[in-house]
């Protein structure tokens, strides 16, 4: 039996594929390359020496997705495919609602039809909105501040209702905190298009000389040094959580939510310092205005993932910075030749 990986060519999907292939799992992968390149899949094969079936399919194309299930024995799915840029989701909300929600509805309908009732879903800490306190546990109130977050919360609710209607479903909702870093080989990593929105890709491009200076968005937050605090997690640790979640989903039915973070919060300036220590490169930065919608602090209490999935993050912040840089210097233009 195979696991379907939607969005496997993307940043987290490609790292998860490596972990699953190395664990001997059979994979079928779909992606439409809206935010990724086929090269990442070649690199996954290069790292693991293992093969998998791939279909260039859009989740919005119901018949094409259904055919993937007809041609393969798929019993479960790890569902990464979705659009993820918060700013773009505000300017193009319909695109985000349609792609993320309709895509998931198609997927779940087809899974149900083929008796594949196990799903691990990529959610986000964004569903906690502006949390009243930190660290955050899974039972905190949920809210969103942008259409991207709204798609995540809506999909969480859809999956809950699906299980309520048919309790053979096994639903594992992983709420990622801030994934960064890259595979140690330097063959796969994050390949943002255009100017990076997120902190680590931006710092990495400053370190490599591709950008001049990091803008630190505000130093008047209620944090130890005034800059925003987040829970950064190594993408390989995050990838490993998916293997644990699939193993668990194979033994239980129900709906479970897990925070996938380290439990440690670092400020923007902490990250700049860690990056400099890990790479020996000075990061040029300036303090600028706050970015609208940003919050003071966001970090996980990851105890549930430890207790239930026997998973915890292994890499520290310097590992994350070093591996980001290693990927960048080996691939100055990402997956472009
Ligand atoms: P990514 O953009 O690198 O990967 C997503 C993949 O899905 C891409 O390869 C894209 O081409 C594909 N895709 C998108 N829409 C599709 C569709 N309709 N049909 C087929 N393929 C489609 O993003 P990522 O960072 O790897 O994130 C993976 C998932 O995790 C996303 O759902 C994202 O929202 C979620 N997530 C990411 C982060 C993060 O910081 N990276 C944080 C929390 C949650
Ligand atoms: C953002 C998204 C979140 C998404 C996550 C991962 C917003 C409001 N939130 O989280 O929904 O799940 O990315 O994709 O966009 N920073 C700078 N300078 C920069 C970039 C960032 O100072 O050039 C600061 C931010 O103000 C923040 C921290 O760095 O304090 C982390 O920012 P970022 O990497 O964008 O992640 P989040 O905002 O936590």
Image (cartoon, rainbow, N blue to C red):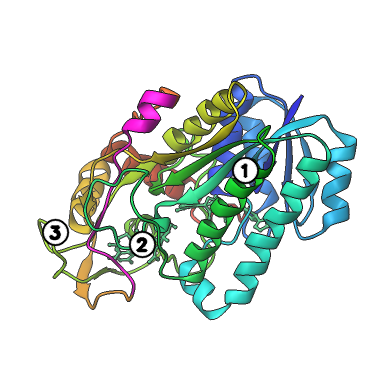
Upstream in sequence: badge 3 or badge 2: 2
Residue contact at pointers 3 and 2, CB within 8 angstroms: no
- Quadrant of image for the C terminus: bottom right
Q: Which of marks 3 and 1 is in front?
A: 1
Q: In which quarter of the image is residue 166?
A: top right
The reply, left or right, for residue 294 in relation to residue 21 is left
How far from the left and from the top, in percent, is residue 265? 23, 47
- The front one of 302 and 57 is 302
**What's the residue at 30%, 68% (across, down)?**
294
The reply, left or right, for residue 167 in relation to residue 334 is right
**What's the residue at 38%, 48% (across, down)?**
177
Give the alpha-carbon distance from disc 3 to disc 1, as whole Å.
Answer: 41 Å
How far from the left and from the top, in percent, is residue 300? 30, 44
Q: Mark 1 points at which residue?
A: 164
Does the rendering let one see residue 80? Answer: no
How far from the left and from the top, in percent, is residue 121? 57, 44
- The front one of 144 and 161 is 161
The reply, left or right, for residue 217 in relation to residue 64 is left
Give the alpha-carbon distance from disc 2 to disc 1, as whole Å.
Answer: 25 Å
Secondary structure type for disc 1 = helix
Q: Mark 2 points at which residue?
A: 129
Residue 223 is marked as: 3
- Provide the residue span drawn in magenta: 293-308
The reply, left or right, for residue 6 in relation to residue 195 is right
**What's the residue at 68%, 32% (across, down)?**
168
């Amino acid at each position: 039996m195979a696991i379907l990986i939607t969005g496997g060519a993307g940043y987290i999907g490609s790292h998860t594929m490596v972990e699953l292939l190395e664990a001997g799992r059979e994979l079928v992968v779909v992606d439409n390359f809206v935010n990724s390149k086929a090269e990442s899949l070649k690199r996954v094969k290069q790292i693991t020496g293992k093969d998998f079936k791939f279909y260039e399919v859009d989740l919005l194309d119901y018949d094409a997705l259904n055919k993937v299930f007809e041609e393969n024995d798929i019993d479960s799915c790890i569902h990464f495919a979705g659009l993820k840029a918060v700013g773009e989701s505000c300017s193009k909300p319909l695109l985000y609602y349609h792609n993320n929600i309709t895509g998931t509805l198609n997927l779940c309908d087809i899974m149900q039809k083929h008796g594949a009732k196990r799903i691990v879903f990529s959610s986000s800490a964004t569903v906690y909105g502006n949390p009243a306190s930190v660290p955050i546990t899974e039972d905190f109130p949920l809210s969103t501040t942008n259409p991207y977050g709204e798609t995540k919360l809506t999909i969480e609710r859809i999956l809950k209702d699906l299980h309520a209607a048919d309790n053979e479903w096994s639903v594992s909702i992983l709420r990622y905190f801030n994934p960064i870093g890259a595979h140690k080989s330097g063959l796969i990593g994050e390949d943002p298009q255009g100017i990076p929105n997120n902190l680590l890709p931006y710092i990495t491009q400053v370190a490599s000389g591709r950008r001049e200076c990091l803008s630190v968005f505000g130093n008047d937050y209620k944090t130890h040094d005034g800059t925003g605090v987040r829970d950064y997690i190594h993408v390989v640790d995050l990838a490993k959580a998916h293997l644990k979640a699939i193993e668990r989903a194979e033994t239980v039915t129900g709906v479970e939510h897990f925070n996938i973070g380290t439990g440690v919060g670092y400020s923007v300036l902490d990250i700049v310092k860690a990056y400099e220590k890990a790479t020996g490169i000075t990061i040029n930065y300036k303090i600028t205005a706050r970015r609208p919608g940003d919050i003071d602090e966001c970090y996980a209490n990851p105890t549930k993932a430890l207790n239930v999935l026997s998973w915890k993050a292994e890499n520290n912040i310097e590992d994350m910075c070093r591996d980001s840089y290693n990927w960048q210097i080996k691939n100055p233009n990402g997956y472009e030749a």
